[in-house]
Image (cartoon, coloured by chain):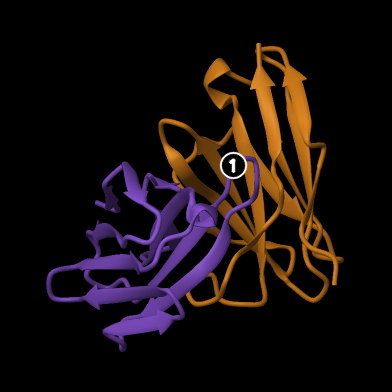
Chain colours: A purple, B orange
């Protein structure tokens, strides 16, 4: 079925440490994998995305890796800062009779100063 | 450029009633998608409209419907409200393809059904 799993559901790290969030998807045809950050009381915002023809993508302290064979992708945040505290959602595209972007359940990241 | 605007921000309705939510996309964006966000289920895709036509849909019952106007503004309607419909409803606009372009979200409408 259509499913995106995300782990862990909560994550606490010390400021300056790295944080890693992992997602797995079920549809082998998925080819677009965005990550959204939602701060408390605010709207989700895209922070990085990756397409299936790319294995890794970086943007300053944020990187995403994709393993299409294993059907999983990960978000890596290095040198975490308190403002990185938020809920992070991964997502995967699904193309069936209808197109969808299926979101993972989210990871609540807390960066402790 | 103005962002995605949703109205109203908050709503309280009674079971059995119906409700209409509104979303104005970013100027030039023709795709509008709707999502239901709850603590237990996360972000769930409802449907997407593009050029006044429903282009894609999720797995919600027929009580959830929508439409899009010629200016790309979209409305979502929920009929015969149930307690479980209480959620934050987010809309997002895109420049094009649902599967390959960034979603710009609105602030959401928080619906409480009592």
The residue sitting at 83% across, 72% down in the picture is B27
The answer to whether any part of residue B57 appears in the image is: no
- Direction left: furthest residue: A70
* x, y percent for residue A48: 47, 73
Q: Quadrant of residue B65?
A: top right
A86 displayed left or right of A50: right
The residue sitting at 57% across, 72% down in the picture is B102
B93 displayed left or right of B11: left
Secondary structure of residue under mark 1: loop
A67 displayed left or right of A48: left
Q: Which residue is mark 1?
A: A40
Q: Is residue A92 above or below residue B23?
A: below
The residue sitting at 64% across, 51% down in the picture is A43
Q: Nearer the viewer, residue A86 or B36?
A: A86
Q: Quadrant of residue A110?
A: top left
- Direction bottom: furthest residue: A53
Q: Is residue B2 above or below residue A105?
A: below
Q: Quadrant of residue A31?
A: bottom left
* x, y percent for residue B36: 55, 40
The residue sitting at 65% across, 58% down in the picture is B92
Badge 1 density bin: few <14, some 14–19, many ≥20, Cα 10 Å: few
Q: Nearer the viewer, residue B105 or A82?
A: A82
């Amino acid at each position: 079925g259509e499913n995106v799993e995300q782990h862990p559901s909560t994550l606490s790290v010390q400021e300056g440490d790295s944080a890693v969030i992992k997602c797995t998807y079920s549809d082998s045809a998925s080819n677009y994998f965005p990550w959204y950050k939602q701060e408390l009381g605010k709207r989700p915002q895209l922070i990085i995305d990756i397409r299936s023809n790319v294995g890794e993508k970086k943007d300053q302290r944020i990187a995403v890796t994709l393993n299409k064979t294993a059907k999983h992708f990960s978000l890596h945040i290095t040198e975490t800062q308190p403002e990185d505290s938020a809920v992070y959602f991964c997502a995967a595209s699904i193309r069936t009779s209808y197109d969808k972007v299926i979101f993972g359940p989210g990871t609540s990241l807390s960066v402790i100063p | 450029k103005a962002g995605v605007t949703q109205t109203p921000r908050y709503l309280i309705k009674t079971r059995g009633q119906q409700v209409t939510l509104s979303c104005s996309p970013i100027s030039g964006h023709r795709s509008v998608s709707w999502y239901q966000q709850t603590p237990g289920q996360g972000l769930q895709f409802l449907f997407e409209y593009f050029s006044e036509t429903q282009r894609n849909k999720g797995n919600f019952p027929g009580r959830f419907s929508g439409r899009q106007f010629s200016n790309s503004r979209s409305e979502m309607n929920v009929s015969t409200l149930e307690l479980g419909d209480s959620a934050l409803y987010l809309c997002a606009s895109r420049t094009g393809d649902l599967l390959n372009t960034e979603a710009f979200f609105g602030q959401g409408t928080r619906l409480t059904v009592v």
